[in-house]
């Protein structure tokens, strides 16, 4: 039996963070994989959901190419929480799962101050 293999990253608005990385895993769990269906501890499921909701506040949903609202301190806190949750998830799933960390770190947009000074007139 081929081991379970999944890519780990958050995708804007999806609510999910696991994506099957081989045919066997895709056949067993689909693509993407719903972490609610894996028998994980409730506090870990809640933390994944919290991170997804938190991440979605980093995007400028009115016009995504414009800067989002997060300052570097919030980006750093979020990035650290994601790494800790990934480690906890790998431990909870055990050795029968291979997780591949592919989550993009978030950083403060260098144009954020300029955007905030004049959102209507902002141009990159």
Image (spheres, rainbow, N blue to C red):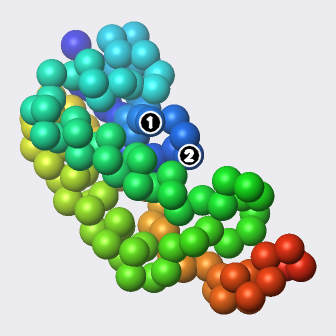
Where, quadrant-wise, is the C terminus in this rendering?
A: bottom right
Front-lying residue, 86 or 73: 73
Q: Residues within 10 Å of mark 2 (few under 14, many from 20)?
A: some
Whether residue 102 is visible to the viewer of this picture, yes or no, is no
Residue plotted at (29% across, 43% down): 48
Residue plotted at (45% across, 55% down): 55
Q: Position of residue 102 (x, y in %)?
A: 43, 53
Q: Is residue 65 above or below residue 52?
A: below
Q: Position of residue 96 (x, y in %)?
A: 15, 28
Q: Is residue 9 above or below residue 23?
A: below
Give me the C-alpha separation between circle 2 and circle 1.
8 Å
Residue highlighted by disc 2: 12
Image side of residue 66 versus residue 108, left or right: right
Residue highlighted by disc 1: 15
The part of the image, by quadrant, that contains residue 42 is: top left
Front-lying residue, 78 or 118: 118
């Amino acid at each position: 039996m081929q081991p379970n293999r999944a890519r780990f990253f958050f995708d804007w608005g999806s609510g999910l963070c696991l994506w099957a990385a081989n045919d066997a895993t895709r056949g067993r769990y689909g693509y993407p994989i719903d972490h609610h269906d894996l028998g994980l501890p409730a506090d870990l499921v809640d933390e994944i959901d919290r991170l997804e909701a938190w991440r979605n506040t980093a995007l400028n949903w009115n016009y995504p190419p414009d800067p989002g609202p997060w300052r570097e301190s919030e980006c750093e806190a979020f990035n650290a929480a994601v790494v800790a949750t990934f480690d906890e998830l790998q431990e909870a799933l055990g050795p029968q799962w291979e997780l591949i960390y592919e989550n993009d770190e978030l950083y403060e947009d260098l144009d954020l101050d300029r955007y905030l000074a004049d959102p209507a007139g902002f141009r990159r």
